């Protein structure tokens, strides 16, 4: 099969698809649609869905453990990736304060304490602190929640299985 694109990354990705290797146009078309979606995709996500996700999370109870965070981030990443890809928003950092507001008070406190200790948080003109950019914020949230999982596991007594005789 002869190829029509000049972008080497796209060409390499397409050449690695089973439909291309077999010379099967029907399979290649299916692979391309699976990988990249429709030629003119319908608008699936809007900013208001992201706002709704933040509001729903706060209404259900703030994020206080790793499983809640992962569940939230699954929806968040899907929406934010779409909005960035199709340029509905200029950058992800527009929502870092909203993410911070979804966290429970003790998680917020622990994260802020750690970021201040490591001199990551920037001071505002009036002496308060500004929420860090999204990439840094996510890193500290994940560190804190993973540390809590580790502590919980370490504090739990080991389960001893009864031996069957």
Image (cartoon, rainbow, N blue to C red):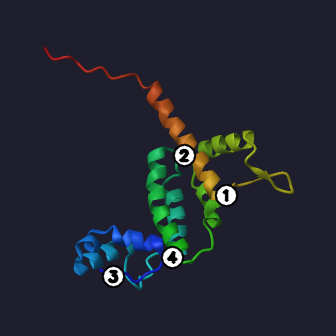
Q: Secondary structure at mark 2?
A: helix
In the rendered image, the quadrant that contains the N terminus is bottom left
Q: Residue tagged by mark 4? A: 46
User: Which residue is pictured at 51% across the width and 30% down the height?
Assistant: 151
Image point 54% across, 63% down: which residue? Answer: 55
Marks 4 and 2 close (CB-CB < 8 Å): no
SS label for mark 1: loop
Q: Note whether residue 129 is visible.
A: yes
Number of other residues with Cα within 10 Å of mark 1, as a class: few under 14, some 14 to 19, many 20 or more: some
Q: Is residue 126 above or below residue 50?
A: above
| Residue 82 circle label | none
Labelled pair 3, 1 in contact (Cβ < 8 Å): no
Q: Nearer the viewer, mark 3 or mark 2?
A: 3
What is the CA distance from the residue labelled 3 to the residue labelled 1? Answer: 45 Å
Residue 96 x %, y %: 63, 60
Quick one: label 2, few (<14), some, or many (20+) residues within 10 Å? some
Q: Nearer the viewer, residue 55 or 125?
A: 125
Cα distance between the residues tagged 4 and 2: 26 Å
Residue in the image at 56% along x and 78% along y:
88
Give the percent coordinates (x, y) of residue 106: 61, 42
- Which residue position is annotated with label 2? 142
Mark 4 or mark 1, which is nearer the start of the sequence? 4
Residue 115 point in image, percent of width and height: 70, 44
Q: Quadrant of the C terminus?
A: top left
Residue furthest to the left = 165
Query: Vertically, is 31 above or below 66?
Result: below
Secondary structure under the numbered disc 3 in the rendered image? loop
* Mark with earlier residue (4, 2): 4
Residue named by callout 3: 2
In the rendering, at what x and y percent does residue 113 appear? 70, 40
Which residue does the numbered mark 1 point to in the structure image?
133
């Amino acid at each position: 099969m002869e190829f029509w694109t000049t972008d080497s990354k796209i060409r390499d990705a397409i050449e690695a698809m089973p439909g291309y290797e077999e010379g099967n146009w029907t399979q290649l078309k299916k692979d391309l649609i699976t990988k990249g979606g429709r030629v003119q995709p319908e608008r699936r996500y809007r900013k208001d869905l992201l706002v709704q996700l933040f509001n729903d999370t706060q209404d259900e109870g703030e994020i206080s453990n790793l499983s809640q965070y992962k569940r939230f981030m699954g929806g968040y990443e899907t929406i934010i990736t779409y909005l960035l890809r199709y340029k509905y928003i200029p950058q992800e950092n527009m929502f870092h304060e909203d993410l911070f507001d979804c966290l429970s008070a003790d998680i917020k406190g622990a994260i802020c304490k750690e970021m201040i200790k490591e001199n990551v948080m920037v001071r505002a003109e009036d002496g308060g602190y500004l929420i860090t950019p999204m990439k840094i914020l996510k890193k500290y949230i994940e560190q804190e929640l993973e540390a809590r999982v580790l502590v919980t596991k370490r504090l739990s007594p080991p389960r001893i299985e009864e031996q069957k005789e």
